[in-house]
Amino acid sequence: MKLRLFYVPNNKAIVAKVKEKFYQLPICTPIEKPIELMPCQPFVEKESTSKPYEINNTQCYEWVNDLSVNAPNNNDIERIYIRAGKPQMILRVNYSKNGNDKDVLTVSGNLPIYVLNGVAKLLTMTFID
């Protein structure tokens, strides 16, 4: 399963595409395919991190593993990096525990925080074939 991020110039928003469906970020509701799409590129200088999203199923781990790529920096092998579209669109996924000892994940990258929150939410959703 692939994750791709696109910029929609008409409304200056970023949408995600998963399994031929498009999702409005950050709420992750399905939308019709936008008329005009451009591959999303990192465009914020400062890296941000999403809020933590609880992992409720094993599909999340499998999907992140499928999306994972080699670390951009060979000294950073402990972290997980995923590709969300074009080769330059690399995001970092971090796993941790919340206050209730539940597994959570966050996503970091050079994108607006609402996009990172949407990607983190998408990664924790269950998709049925």
Image (cartoon, rainbow, N blue to C red):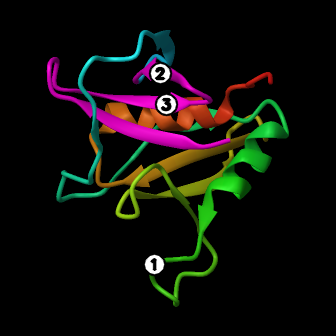
Residue 91's x, y, as percent? 45, 56
Asked whether 28 falls inside the magenta stretch, the response is: no
Q: Secondary structure at mark 2?
A: strand
| Nearer-N-terminus badge (1/2) | 2
Tell me the CA gap for discs 1 and 2: 28 Å
* Quadrant in the rendering for residue 40: top left
- Kindly identify the amino acid type of the residue bearing the numbered disc 2: Phe
Residue at 38% in and 57% down:
89
CB contact under 8 Å: marks 1 and 3: no
Tell me the CA gap for discs 1 and 3: 24 Å
Tell me the CA gap for discs 2 and 3: 4 Å
Mark 3 = which residue?
17
Q: Residue furthest front?
A: 35
Residue at 74% in and 25% down:
126
Residue 20's x, y, as percent? 56, 26
Q: Is residue 97 above or below residue 65?
A: above
Q: Is residue 107 above or below residue 79?
A: above
Magenta: predominant secondary structure element?
strand
Mark 2 = which residue?
22
The circle on residue 108 is none
Q: Nearer the viewer, residue 34 or 123?
A: 34
Quadrant of the image for the N terminus?
Answer: top right
The circle on residue 72 is 1
